[in-house]
Amino acid sequence: MHAPLKTLERPTFADGRNAPIGALRAFVTLLVIAHHTAMAYHPYAPAPKAFDAPPILWTAFPVVDPQKVGAFGILTLVNDMFFMSLMFFISGLFVAQGLRTKGSGGFLKGRALRLGVPFVIGAGLLAPLAYYPAWLQSGGAPSLGAFAQAWTRLPFWPGGPAWFLWVLLAFAAIVAALHALAPGAIDALGRLAKGAEAKPGRFFLGLVAVSLAAYLPLSMTTPFGHWTMIGPFSVQTARIGHYLVYFLAGVAVGAAGVGQGLTDPDGKLARRWWLWQLAPIAPIVGGVATLILAFSPNPPPRPFLDLFGGLMFALACAALSFAALATFLRFVRKTGPIGASLQANAYGMYLLHYVFTSWLAWMLLPQAWGGLAKGAAVFVGATALSWLLTMALRRMPLLGRIL
């Protein structure tokens, strides 16, 4: 049997009004796996070079296959516009419930166990394991000792997807401290989301405005795509405030109760789901146009690119997030056994999948299947293996409480 899960704030997603959120969370996890799969076959993936040669790009491209897929460039571009922001939003939905039932101390203790321990394992063990193929493809000797020596000489400690965990833990600590110092703050946040079930467009515009205000100052003063890296702690510099806004938006929506307000399956967002599928089109096109202009022979001044590109990013992120949320609110009412298993194991799959996407892509390098077939094989294989391994690990007493 699975280990007891009572000690952590683990919501039940499978049925009822929580079902759409659980399904959405599992879907975003699959998007993460697809994203990391596609990077090996990205049309603009950089050619492998010396392991320590700057800029160190293998942190994003652990394996680079010469067989490319042009569509994977669009997939990763669109994914990057919203999927981690949406993950922060979903993570914030159940924070108010946890704070009310456990208090700031109990909530933070649970978060530290469920996020802090996996971060240490993910950054300390899983990341080096996932990046070992990058060492091999760069011409490194097939020796763990040589790899370890090269790894420890890097200017930072690549943590892979574990970056999300420490940032989420930091956000949780901020909200827990806020709740301890001002117990009414969470309810005040909830009032900002009041009426969103009837007027989702108003909440959408507010989210765009606040996230843009958080994003632009950093975006305009840091290099494009810059990551802040201190030891194993990394985050995309321009997006840290933007991610916090999405997390707090999730806290605000969740303060009214999941399945209520914006997440009401009978609300206007769900009823007009089809209209929200059209909303991302224009900002996505605008974002692509910004990139084309930025890398053209005669690009416009950077302030224009930053302002226009930042606006397109904020609009696309919110529109894609609302489109996904609306779809799942409209069509998911209950979850079958396979879906329930996917939801229950999604967190572990997020933690483990990067090892499998890297190693499977490396193992398929000699094959002449074409990038699309390889990508499909890696995605299916990484999903299945991380799913099965998570199921096995959750049967262990301590890991079952965390995963």
Image (tube, rainbow, N blue to C red):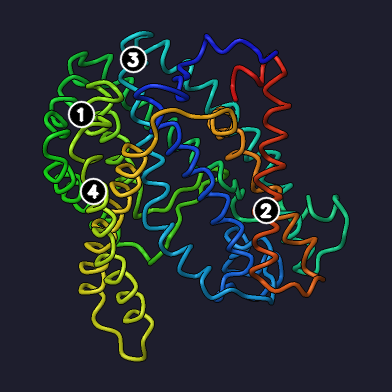
Residue at image coords 34%, 44%: 327
Find out whether the residues at labels 2 and 3 contact each other: C-beta distance under 8 Å.
Answer: no
Q: Which residue is mark 4?
A: 211
Residue 311 rendering spot, x and y as whole percentages: 21, 62
Q: Residue 73 versus residue 48: which sits nearer the camera?
A: 73
Chain-order first, disc 4 or disc 3: 3
Task: Give the answer, above or below, for where 312 lies relative to 318.
Answer: below
Q: Which residue is mark 1?
A: 261
| Alpha carbon separation for disc pair 3 and 1 | 19 Å
Q: Examine the image and state in which quarter residue 4 appears.
A: top right
Find out whether the residues at labels 1 and 4 contact each other: C-beta distance under 8 Å.
Answer: no
Q: Residues within 10 Å of mark 1 (few under 14, many from 20)?
A: many
Q: Which residue is mark 3?
A: 99
Q: Examine the image and state in which quarter residue 162 appears.
A: top right
If the image is split into quadrants, where does the N terminus sit?
top right
Q: Which amino acid type corresponds to the residue marked 3 in the rendered image?
A: Leu
- Tag nearer the camera, 1 or 4: 1
Q: Which residue is mark 2?
A: 357
Task: Give the answer, above or below, for where 118 lies relative to 357.
Answer: above
| Alpha carbon separation for disc pair 4 and 3 | 24 Å
Residue at image coords 25%, 36%: 249
Task: Give the answer, above or below, for where 331 lies relative to 392.
Answer: below
Chain-order first, disc 1 or disc 2: 1
Badge 2 marks a residue whose secondary structure is: helix
Q: Which amino acid type corresponds to the residue marked 1 in the rendered image?
A: Gly
Find out whether the residues at labels 4 and 3 contact each other: C-beta distance under 8 Å.
Answer: no
Residue 27 rendering spot, x and y as whole percentages: 48, 43
